[in-house]
């Protein structure tokens, strides 16, 4: 975001300045940095942990906003001229800000500690300084230290039929990033169950042992919700393909074409839908999957080969399948920047996708070194903890709305940085 004025937030009005952190259910964080990429990266991570954000390019736009809303945490960058950060810290101290302040910069430690000392003199809760470049884990440690974030839990067991009957199922969205352009190119939906006692529950707790009929019902719900989410994104002027995971057994039983035609946006700009199908299921019945892919293709729905690893003997046959993406197994992606065994395997999958004229998507990216390696290998897209966690649809929309609102245009549809590979 490049606007100099404070952008609109998706939160209700908070307490006035000086009142300290709010007791509202959803925490709020202000992110102050002149680099849009850094702001967007922090917002992605924070949103994934259930924390709302408002972004500011500098302290001059932050300070007036404190009179209207009081956040729980402020990420405050110290730029080349540290005067702006010092002025903000002094202003926060005079206003009696009771939240936490996290300084960050690529400047020398002495400068950082000086600004931190000013904050301490003004009785602010100054966290240990954060040196750029930093990794996602550093942000997570801050969230945990302040006990701000909420993460889905893995309950001992939850019955899928019960979750469906009680309407506990919801869908969270994880950004899909163009690794070379560092732009948002799509999003993938993941099911969550919001249990009244356990809270938000991960799929492993309610998917294991589920009947085929239950999985078909879940798949139908997923299709309808993802298509409706596409409508919400399109109202922001953002048209990007969304991805949903559906097993072959469910695809065969569902009237996918009818569901798509009923719920999709009825404009020529519809970017289409991607359905992830596990590689093992594709290879098990290639003729069936090919037939499904061709039939769905008429409605701008394409199949992606999910969880593609190293042990598929029928790779040559995949050329017969009209798929759009190969998604590289996260076990191969992990440490591909340093693991001499993983790197060539990733490269071979990427080359295979390109040989078929398709896109390669790396799953489970957690380290910047792996991003650098994947880009050098020619990988097209990526998903993972580093680039953005799955987050509730409303939170994902609020992040997009901030970008569109402050830029006044389609963010194309957005920029997602890898801060470890850049220098402020």
Image: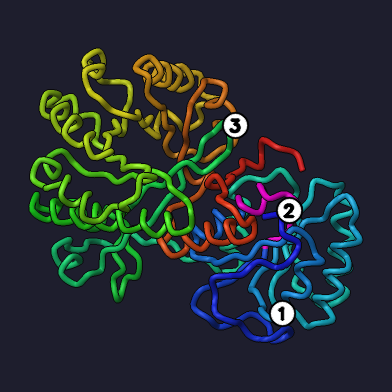
Which residue is disc 2 drawn over?
A: 130
Q: Is residue 52 magenta?
A: no
Q: Distance between the Cα atoms at labels 1 and 3?
A: 37 Å
Q: Earlier in the sequence, mark 1 or mark 3?
A: 1
User: For the residue labelled by badge 3, is the local secondary structure a helix, a strand or a loop?
Assistant: helix
Which residue is disc 3 drawn over?
A: 369
Q: Is residue 40 magenta?
A: yes
- Magenta part of the protein: which range? 31-41
Which residue is disc 1 drawn over?
A: 98
Q: Distance between the Cα atoms at labels 3 and 2?
A: 19 Å
Q: Earlier in the sequence, mark 3 or mark 2?
A: 2
Q: Is residue 215 left or right of residue 61?
A: left
Q: Residues within 10 Å of mark 3 (few under 14, many from 20)?
A: some
User: For the residue labelled by badge 1, is the local secondary structure a helix, a strand or a loop?
Assistant: loop
Residue 308 in picture, x, y percent from top left: 32, 28
Judging depth in this view, the residue of 287 and 280 nearest the camera is 287
Q: Distance between the Cα atoms at labels 1 and 2?
A: 20 Å
Residue in the picture at 60% in, 50% down: 41
User: For the residue labelled by badge 2, is the local secondary structure a helix, a strand or a loop?
Assistant: strand
């Amino acid at each position: 975001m490049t606007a100099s004025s404070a952008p609109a937030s998706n939160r209700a009005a908070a307490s006035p300045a000086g009142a300290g952190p709010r007791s509202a259910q959803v925490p709020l964080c202000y992110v102050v940095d002149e680099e849009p990429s850094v702001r967007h990266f922090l917002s992605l991570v924070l949103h994934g942990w259930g924390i709302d954000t408002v972004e500011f390019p500098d302290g001059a736009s932050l300070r007036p906003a404190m009179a209207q809303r009081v956040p729980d945490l402020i990420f405050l960058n110290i730029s080349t001229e540290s005067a702006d950060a010092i002025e903000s810290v002094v202003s926060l101290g005079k206003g009696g800000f009771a939240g936490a302040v996290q300084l960050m910069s690529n400047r020398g430690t002495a400068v950082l500690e000086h600004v931190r000392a000013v904050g301490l003199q003004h009785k602010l809760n100054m966290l240990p300084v954060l040196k750029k470049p930093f990794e996602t884990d550093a942000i997570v440690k801050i969230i945990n230290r302040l006990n701000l974030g909420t993460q889905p839990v893995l309950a001992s067991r939850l019955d899928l039929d019960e979750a469906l009957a009680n309407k506990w199922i919801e869908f969270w969205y994880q950004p899909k990033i163009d690794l070379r352009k560092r732009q948002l190119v799509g999003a993938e939906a993941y099911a969550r169950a919001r249990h009244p006692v356990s809270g938000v529950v991960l799929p492993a707790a309610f998917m294991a042992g589920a009947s085929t009929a239950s999985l078909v019902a879940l798949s139908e719900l997923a299709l309808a919700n993802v298509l409706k989410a596409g409508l919400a994104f399109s109202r922001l002027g953002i048209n990007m393909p969304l991805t949903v995971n559906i097993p072959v057994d469910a695809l065969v039983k569902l009237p996918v074409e009818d569901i798509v035609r009923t719920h999709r946006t009825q404009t020529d700009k519809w970017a289409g839908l991607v359905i992830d199908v596990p590689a093992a299921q594709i290879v098990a019945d290639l003729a069936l999957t090919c037939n499904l892919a061709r039939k769905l293709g008429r409605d701008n729905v394409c199949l992606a080969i999910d969880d593609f690893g190293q042990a598929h003997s029928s790779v040559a046959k995949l050329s017969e399948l009209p798929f759009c993406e190969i998604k590289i197994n996260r076990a191969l992606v992990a440490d591909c920047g340093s693991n001499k065994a993983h790197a060539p395997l990733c490269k071979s999958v990427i080359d295979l996708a390109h040989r078929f004229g398709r896109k390669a998507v790396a799953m489970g990216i957690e380290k910047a070194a792996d991003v650098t390696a994947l880009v050098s290998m020619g990988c097209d897209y990526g998903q993972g903890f580093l680039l953005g966690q799955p987050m509730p649809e409303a939170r994902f929309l609020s992040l997009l709305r901030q970008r569109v609102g402050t830029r006044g245009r389609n963010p194309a549809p957005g920029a997602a940085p890898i801060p470890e590979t850049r220098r402020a």
